[in-house]
Image (spheres, rainbow, N blue to C red):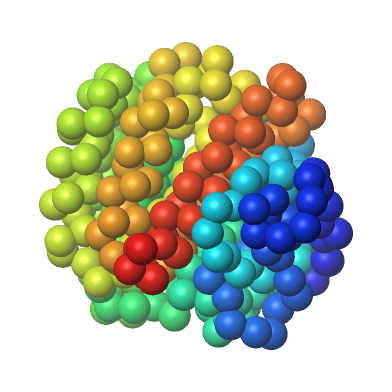
Amino acid sequence: MTPFVWKGRHDGPGPAHRRLWHTVSEPGGPADAAIVGFESDEGVRRNRGRVGAVEGPAALRTALASLAVHDDLTLVDHGDVTVEDDDLEDAQRRLGEAVARARRDAPLTVVLGGGHESAYGSYLGLGHPPRLGVINLDAHLDLREADRPTSGTPFLQIARDRRERGLDVRYAAIGVSTASNTTALFDTAREIGAQWVLDDDCQDAEAPLELVSRFVADVDEVYLSIDLDVLPGSAAPGVSAPAALGVPPVVIQAICDAVVDSGRLVHLDVTELCPRLDADARTARVAARLIHRVITRETARRRGA
């Protein structure tokens, strides 16, 4: 694991000046949330996308560091899992081990990607609960058939793993683009019993929130995955495949709020940030706002604030 040195704006001592980087410590003690980075774009490369997401975890931490924190918060950072010798499969396994360790520190784990291949590693760290629901905010279904794992295969990998274990598959995708997913992908989604809402129907929050309400009622734990290409390209240019339409940030935020408020969220990952393609760190900043929102809202909910 590679550690990250947190630093950011410092306006003065005490809680009145607290920013997120002040709340981060090393692993080993109880915390509100535990962070793990996944330095990988090997899955994006295999999927013939634009590489650069390997730099995402550092850029996300940098964007998070100076955000204000208004209530008590304790975070721990477990550092970064890296891909060695292009061996994505081993890196996914090691990410799962890192997430499992992080879960001993905190009730909420957060993976900073990295390409969306991180999703299968995230899943491996959750311990295969019987009533797990996976909600993917994404322009793509990521249910591709391939000879080896890529950034386009993780949720099919998850579905197959759960079937092999005799566990139910509960998968919902929100913000899906019909222009970016073939008929074969929608057929696979139907075959595994997936639910989805198209990006056309996510220009306000009504339809996605209705799906979230139904979905969380049928599960005990939720893993929320945010692929930043779900956002409009104007808000999130720094991804491998910017969205032509996308889902407005305020709608994505409302979905995140609903998942948190369900009391079932156990894991979040945020993926596909490609800093070398970003403009004025625009994508990193909107991603950081969403991560900050989820962590602080979940902490307040759990404490009864």
Q: In percent of the image, x 36 and y 63: which residue is there?
A: 305
Q: Quadrant of residue 33?
A: bottom right
Residue 120 seen by the camera: no
Q: Nearer the viewer, residue 114 or 91?
A: 114
Counting every numbered tag in the picture gives 0
Rendering coords of residue 180 (x, y %): 42, 24
Q: Position of residue 40 (x, y in %)?
A: 72, 51
Q: Residue at x 71, y 60 (%)?
A: 14
Q: Residue at x 48, y 20 (%)?
A: 232
Quadrant of residue 300 within the rendered picture: bottom left
**Vertical relation: 283 (above or below) 170:** above
Instruction: Examine the rendered structure and indicate whether residue 299 appears above or below residue 238.
Output: below
**Which one is nearer the viewer's eye here, 138 or 179?**
138
Left or right, 99 with reference to 82: left
Image quadrant holding the N terminus, namely bottom right
Q: Quadrant of residue 250?
A: top left
Of the pair 296 and 56, the residue shown nearer to us: 296
Residue 105 visible, this angle: yes
189 vs 300, left or right, is left
Residue 68: x, y in percent? 62, 46
- Could you tell me which residue is drawn at 24 percent across and 37 percent down? 208
- Taking the image as shown, residue 35 lies to the left or right of residue 142, namely right
In this rendering, the answer to whether 288 lies above or below 198 is below
